[in-house]
Image (spheres, coloured by chain):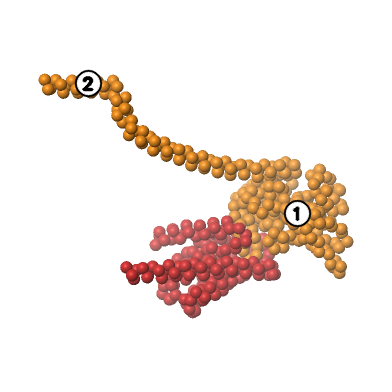
Chain colours: A red, B orange
Amino acid sequence: MLLKIIFLFFFILFLFLMEISLPAFLEISFIFVFTIVFMIKIGKDEESLRRGMKHVFFIVLAGGILLDCYSIFPPGTFILSLLFSRHLAKIFLLKFNTNKPLSILIFGFLISFIYHLLVSVFAFSLSLFFPPVFKIYFNGFYWLDIFRSVWWDGLLISFFSWGLRIIRAKRSLIRNNF
Amino acid sequence: MKKHFIFIVVFVFFLIFFLKGENVFYTILKPAQELFYKSKEVNVEEDLCRQMKIENVQMRTLQTENEILKKHLDFLTRSKDKFVIADVIGQRTESGTTWFLLDKGADQGLKPDLAVLDENGILLGTIIKTEDELSYFRPIFDQRSSIAADIVSHKYLTEIYSQDISQMTKAVSGIVQGEYRSNLKMKYVPLDKEIKIGDGVITAGQDNIRWGITIGQVAEIDKKPNAIFQEVLIEPLFQTNFKIVSVILSP
């Protein structure tokens, strides 16, 4: 358990460093993508999701703190956005069938859109309590940026989820044959 | 007799060993030693080659850094500004907001609204938030960025450091705002002011940003007959892939 947490922490640190090192045109939220892919991976039924949620909570907390520490947004913006996205993703995964590739793609785009919208909402709301250093203009450029982020994040979520599913299927096939 | 023979052989052997032993062993073991030595020699060559490659890469990195720093110092010496040189350690874009992270902060004298320049002295953006050892700057092309600027003729721009501010009374003033990605637009420019394509755009001097920092060149003029102001599209002159920047401290 402890070893898993240590490994997760270093992996989150790696993802965070990737996230802040990418060129501006690649707006990928690696920590968010990892959280969602992890949730898709741990299972569909309530029991397995409940068991894996401890790790998801750790990912959200560690990733959120790191993102908040190196952000111009008010403190707590990313932790809250990730927490709410995690909660919504759990509801989606439990209520809807996400076994088909297309449903994963739709789920990926939808949850990414919700996450980026939540970041803006929390950034705006929390700036009422902290001295604001920025303003959000809900104009065409804002929506274009959101669209770009949703596009990358949604694609990555789908890509990794499909990849993991294929690997799992191949592994079970090999296990059954030998 | 046999005992004596063995004794003599052993004595001669020890004699050779103690007197010339090293040479005897060296002669006997030479082929094997050469084999090992050669293989070791190859390793040494490989090691040396690898070491030289590493040193070469390090030298190139240092040379590049040195060239960038020299360029920074060139224009900073000319402009006589107080400055802090900082490394860009990261960048992020979220909700349409872009920011860059610098490895220098309030402890080094950085504070919000200071100008951040590239190696050629071109305005990159302004500091928006500082921590003790870290600061954030917003690039000039971010749509939230708005900086007071002047449009000056191309001739003037080339002699910018030798001119007197009082001669700038004829400059056209406006507000430079970020558009999308690396586009800049100058707004609130009176319609009657004459601007030419290729004219230089410099900071007008506000709060912590001094007058005369180069921003870009006029690329397009949007003049609508019924409007009060004309809009000017600016081609920014900054380096897009900046790693080292200088922050101009307030006078």
Task: Identify the residue at horizontal 54%, vertical 63% (top origin).
Answer: A30
> In percent of the image, x 64 and y 66: which residue is there?
A145
Q: Is residue A122 above or below residue B242?
A: below
Q: Which residue is labeled 1 in the image? A: B216
Kind of element beneath mark 2: helix
Mark 1, Cα crowd under 10 Å, few <14 / some 14-19 / many 20+, is: many
Under mark 1, the amino acid is Gly
On the image, which quarter does residue B196 sit in? bottom right
Quarter that holds the N terminus of chain A: bottom left
The circle drawn on residue A151 is none
**Chain ID at mark 1:** B
- Residue B15 makes an appearance in the image: yes
Task: Report which residue position mark 2 lands on.
Answer: B12
Indicate whether A12 appears above or below B52: below
Residue sitting at x 65%, y 65%: B96
Viewport quadrant of the C terminus of chain A: bottom left
Mark 1 or mark 2, earlier in chain: 2
Give coordinates of residue B114: x percent, y percent: 70, 52
Q: Element under label 1? A: strand
Q: Nearer the viewer, residue A143 or B135?
A: A143
- Disc 2 is attached to a residue of which chain? B
